[in-house]
């Protein structure tokens, strides 16, 4: 078993740096360069570039939002960054193939998807320690995840088998699985408990009823439907269509697409400003970070970053709902 002690208290030292000023920074993860770029959110100016680990894919904040985790799939480690400055705080080794990760809503579980090893690693959080509880075999290439509201289940898309896998966190077992579409990627849970999965090998979002264990609808969005990000209002969700160079705005109540936003360069991960007016998107194929005015439905700016920019994070963001 692996025990990982995390210095949560480090987050308190952010006050020493002048949090208000640093809250204007944007952290972008560049997968091909194995770096993070830190930009000034006001003008897109590059502040610093920092190396991380081999083959980093996703950024994820800790539950208290005081640290930002970079998951390095090839170097088998996690790097904890200051979420305001992007500076490295700690490196945790021997985390096997961490392609994607997430914390359960109750904060008790850290789930790590090992895409190339076809398994999910379950860690339990005890105060400041992560304890490896179980490694659960899954279908091929477990990718993105979403949790049930009660933290009992984690829903995982499997890109290599075109399936949804459901892991029971109470028994640490694979509960059930089902086909949902070609190369599923991002997944989102609606307030009503339905699941929305971007079907990257096609052009739609699959609407899944986990009670019926069935795809009940397909929402046409755009070719290469990939990542999903809530608008913060509990009603709309954004879907990045990597091949169509658009972002679709979907209503989670009506389960209909409302409209599209332009997003050139292969849109991927997204963040929403706290006021809900702007969408910041990593453009994977263009080595850019794209800023979109949501109300005007137009691109405001594109800022150069590293190769294959994947994750994006800033502190003054809308809630994930």
Image (tube, helix red, strand yellow):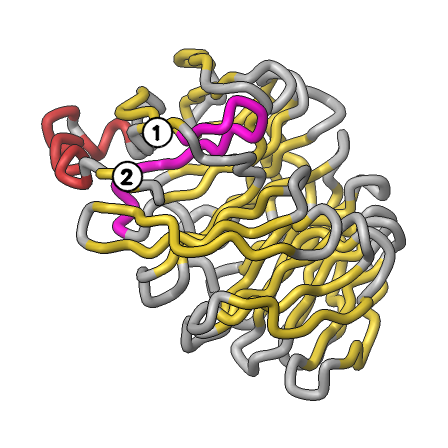
Mark 1 neighbour class, 10 Å CA radius: few under 14, some 14 to 19, many 20 or more: few
Disc tally is: 2
Residue 74 in magenta stretch: yes
Q: Range of the magenta residues?
A: 64-78
* 247 left or right of 168 in image: right
Q: Is mark 1 on a helix, strand or loop?
A: strand
Q: Distance between the residues labelled 1 and 2?
A: 7 Å
Q: Nearer the viewer, residue 69 or 273?
A: 69
User: Where residue 224 appears, x then y in whole percent?
Assistant: 83, 47
**Is residue 275 in sight in this rendering?**
no
Residue at point 69% right, 81% down? 209
The residue at 56%/35% (across/down) is 97
Residue 4 got which mark?
2
Please say if the residues under marks 1 and 2 sit with CB atoms less than 8 Å apart: yes
Residue 92 x/y as whole percent: 35, 29
Q: Nearer the viewer, residue 130 or 171?
A: 171
Q: Would you name the residue on which mark 1 appears?
A: 92
Q: Which residue occupies 71% across, 64% down?
A: 164
Q: Judge by depth and name the residue closer to the eye, 23 or 174.
A: 174
């Amino acid at each position: 078993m692996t025990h990982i002690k995390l210095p949560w208290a480090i987050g308190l030292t952010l006050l020493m740096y002048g949090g208000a000023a640093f809250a204007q920074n944007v952290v972008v993860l560049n997968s091909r360069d194995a770096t993070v770029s830190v930009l000034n959110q006001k003008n897109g100016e590059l502040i610093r570039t920092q190396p991380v680990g081999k083959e980093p894919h996703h950024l994820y904040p800790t539950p208290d939002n005081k640290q930002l985790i970079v998951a390095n799939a090839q170097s088998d480690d996690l790097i904890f960054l200051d979420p305001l400055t992007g500076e490295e705080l700690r490196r945790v080794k021997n985390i096997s193939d961490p392609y994607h990760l997430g914390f359960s809503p109750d904060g008790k579980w850290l789930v790590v998807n090992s895409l190339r090893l076809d398994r999910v690693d379950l860690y339990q959080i005890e105060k400041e320690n992560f304890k490896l509880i179980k490694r659960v075999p899954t279908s091929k290439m477990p990718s993105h995840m979403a949790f049930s509201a009660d933290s009992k289940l984690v829903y995982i898309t499997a890109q290599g088998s075109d399936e949804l896998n459901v892991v029971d966190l109470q028994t640490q077992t694979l509960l059930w699985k089902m086909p949902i579409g070609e190369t599923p990627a991002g997944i989102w849970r609606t307030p009503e408990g339905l699941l929305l999965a971007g079907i990257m090998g096609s052009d739609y979002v699959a609407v899944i009823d986990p009670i019926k264990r069935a795809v009940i609808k397909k929402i046409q969005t755009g070719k290469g439907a990939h990542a999903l990000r809530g608008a913060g209002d509990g009603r709309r969700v954004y879907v990045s269509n990597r091949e169509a160079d658009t972002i679709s705005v979907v209503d989670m109540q009506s389960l209909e697409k409302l409209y599209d936003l332009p997003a050139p360069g292969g849109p991927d991960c997204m963040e929403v400003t706290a006021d809900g007016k702007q969408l910041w998107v990593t453009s994977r194929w263009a080595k850019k970070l794209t800023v979109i005015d949501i109300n005007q439905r137009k691109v405001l700016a594109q800022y150069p970053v590293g190769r294959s920019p994947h994750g994006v994070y800033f502190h003054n963001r809308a809630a994930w709902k």
